[in-house]
Image: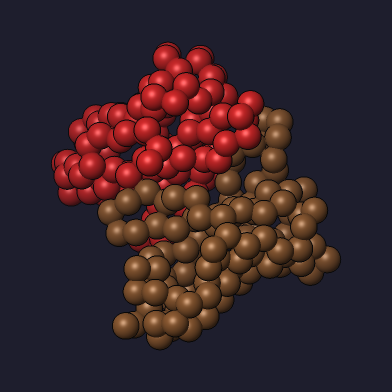
Chain colours: A brown, B red
Amino acid sequence: QQQVKQSPQSLIVQKGGISIINCAYENTAFDYFPWYQQFPGKGPALLIAIRPDVSEKKEGRFTISFNKSAKQFSLHIMDSQPGDSATYFCAASIAGGTSYGKLTFGQGTILTVHP
Amino acid sequence: EADIYQTPRYLVIGTGKKITLECSQTMGHDKMYWYQQDPGMELHLIHYSYGVNSTEKGDLSSESTVSRIRTEHFPLTLESARPSHTSQYLCASSDPRLNTEAFFGQGTRLTVV
């Protein structure tokens, strides 16, 4: 059962454009939603994360928007740069207790930013 | 950059061989995880550990086994490798006491021929 659905599978944007990746989850017990960035040959690295008590979190050019009622969250990359070209994964977990750190991942989005 | 290391980075091995993928972290994290990343990119949790002598199976069934004799070390073993085991294996760790995120190693790409 796919608990976190991510779209699109691939995304091509021009330098300076906005990249938007969307995720939807099913398990209402999830209360921690990180985004990971993965470059070829590397393991995923945490990019930004949000908890459901806020609707938006911004760190530099990266913003997470969260809609608890719709069970959806999205990553926005403003002023996209060629160096942002990577695979992006949304994830969800239950913060705290024995489930902390057990991430359920989306399918991934390959982002290509053209110069 | 997180201090979590996986060896080997790449491994090509014949069917039927026993293999052990190594994972070590120097952050003193109690929780460690193994994820399998299939060719379609999606990551699936196959094993996790809350601490020494604690191991549990993850969401995706796997024929591999793990052990946790020391906090810093979480090796994964396949007793008899098969081509269906060809995949990328990623190790991660986290420390809930410090509310830290899951840090990933660079992965081991395993090919069974």
Residue at 20% x, 44% y is B10
Please state if A31 lies on the left or on the right of B89 as rendered. Answer: right
Please state if B20 lies on the left or on the right of B51 as rendered. Answer: left
Residue at 70% x, 35% y is A96
Q: Residue furthest front?
A: A60
Front position in the image: A99 or A40: A40
Displayed quadrant of residue A10 = bottom left
Q: Is residue B4 visible?
A: yes
List x then y, in percent, for residue B33: 48, 35
Front position in the image: B25 or B43: B25
List x then y, in percent, for residue A79: 48, 77
Displayed quadrant of residue A59 = bottom right
Residue at 40% x, 57% y is A38
> Does A38 sit above or below residue A31?
below
Front position in the image: A81 or B36: A81
Front position in the image: B1 or B25: B1
Residue at 39% x, 24% y is B26
Q: Is residue B67 visible?
A: no
Displayed quadrant of residue A63 = bottom right
List x then y, in percent, for residue A92: 63, 52
Please state if A88 lies on the left or on the right of A50 as rendered. Answer: left
List x then y, in percent, for residue B69: 42, 14
> Does B18 sit above or below residue B14?
above
Q: Residue furthest right?
A: A69
Q: Quadrant of the N terminus of chain B?
A: top left
